[in-house]
Image: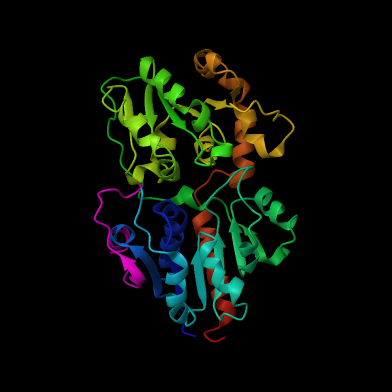
Amino acid sequence: MRKKVAFLFLGETLLIPHLFPIVEQLAEIDPGLPIDLWVSTSLHEDMLVTWTVDYPEVRVRRAPGFRRAFANSIAGPSPLPAKLPMLLRLAPRLARVPVVVCAEQTSLWLPRLVPWFPSRFVKTSHGVGSMSARDDSRRMAAFQTLVPSEQERRTYLDRGMASDRIVATGYVKSAFRQRTPLRSLFDYERPTILYNPHWQPHRSSWPDWGRSVVDFLSAQTEWNVILAPHQRLVERAPEVRAVLTSVANLPHVHVDLDSFAMVDGSYTSAADLYLGDTSSQLIEFLAKPRPAVFLNPFGRTWEADPNFEMWHAGEVVTDLTTLPAAIARARPSHASFLETQRRIADNALGGTDDLGARRAAKQVLRILALSDGTR
């Protein structure tokens, strides 16, 4: 097979910041390497074509079943084609490429169902932290899995993955350069809260407390507020759009339900205080330690549960009436959480530098070298 790497941008746009930094690093380390970026919609295509203009060997290609999106949203509900039919139609083209890189499990159906598939699949993580999903059997079909940290790597070794199939590189998204420029979002200078409930109901504060939290945040005026939930929450809980839109006109509230800033790390970078439950975006936020408050509407006994290690990074609220006081205490008490936050971030991210994408790219090149142009 010809020396080439393919990247699969077939899923939600939230996956782009976990993949594209590796593309950039590959193009910079080996400028002559042909790289195909397979895209499923015009939302992906428009962004990637713009970002790759300086990389002549990087080609953005439309996957079979490519769909043109007519909506203005680039992060909200996206008109994704069905991925399995797309993969099946794409398989003959991928079979001619030695290495295929993806960030989601669906693409691993190809090596899972066809173990003799000639391409080597590299799976890079798109979540981080103590509650990342790891038990999907498709993950075992990847030739190699790239994770942020040795801590994360151990979780896969404990599940039986061979040690040579799992490599810690650092957090790829930290190197994402195309974040949305955030000009002044608010009329008045105040500290800013980001409320970020998880999208899965069993892990989220939204179903029980979301409306009340939004009511509180919109009524107070000591903090500016960013309400930019995970795009899957907007898709799966239709009331979210109505609730947030109802407060979007307030001068101290910024609501974002559709833009790429929801998923590119812009808001976790801009906020002064994180208010949420179990989202991995908390780990991104802690790369630069700042105050955090966690919501526990289920009354979980969490202190000794490793799945909730992140809750040691701030005060945990189990009674919604105590939320205002917890927020008021967050900045004065931050020093008592600082070392814990640094430890959690370092352990989960494999350090807080932005070299994860470069290490990942070098690992892809090592795997490419194994093929030696043939298979």
Q: Quadrant of residue 306?
A: top right
Q: Residue furthest front?
A: 238
Please provide percent x and percent y for residue 14.
Answer: 42, 51
Q: Residue at x 62, y 28 (%)?
A: 298
Give whichever of 172, 126 is nearer the camera: 126
Please provide percent x and percent y for residue 232.
Answer: 44, 45
Q: Is residue 135 above or below residue 371?
A: above
Q: Quadrant of residue 249?
A: top left
In the image, the segment drawn in magenta is: 47-76
Residue 188 left/right relative to 96: left
Q: Is residue 59 above or below residue 145?
A: below
Please tell me whether residue 127 belongs to the stretch shown in magenta.
no
Please provide percent x and percent y for residue 278.
Answer: 57, 36
Please provide percent x and percent y for residue 268.
Answer: 44, 36
Q: How is the image coloured?
A: rainbow
- The answer to whether residue 365 is seen in the rendering is yes
Residue 68 left/right relative to 220: left
- The answer to whether residue 6 is seen in the rendering is no
Q: Is residue 110 above or below residue 175?
A: below
Please tell me whether residue 58 belongs to the stretch shown in magenta.
yes
Q: Residue at x 32, y 63 (%)?
A: 52
Q: Residue at x 33, y 37 (%)?
A: 256
Q: Quadrant of residue 122?
A: bottom right
Give whichever of 273, 84 is nearer the camera: 84
Q: For the image shown, how many numbered marks are present on the structure?
A: 0
Q: Residue at x 58, y 37 (%)?
A: 203
* Quarter that holds the C terminus: bottom right
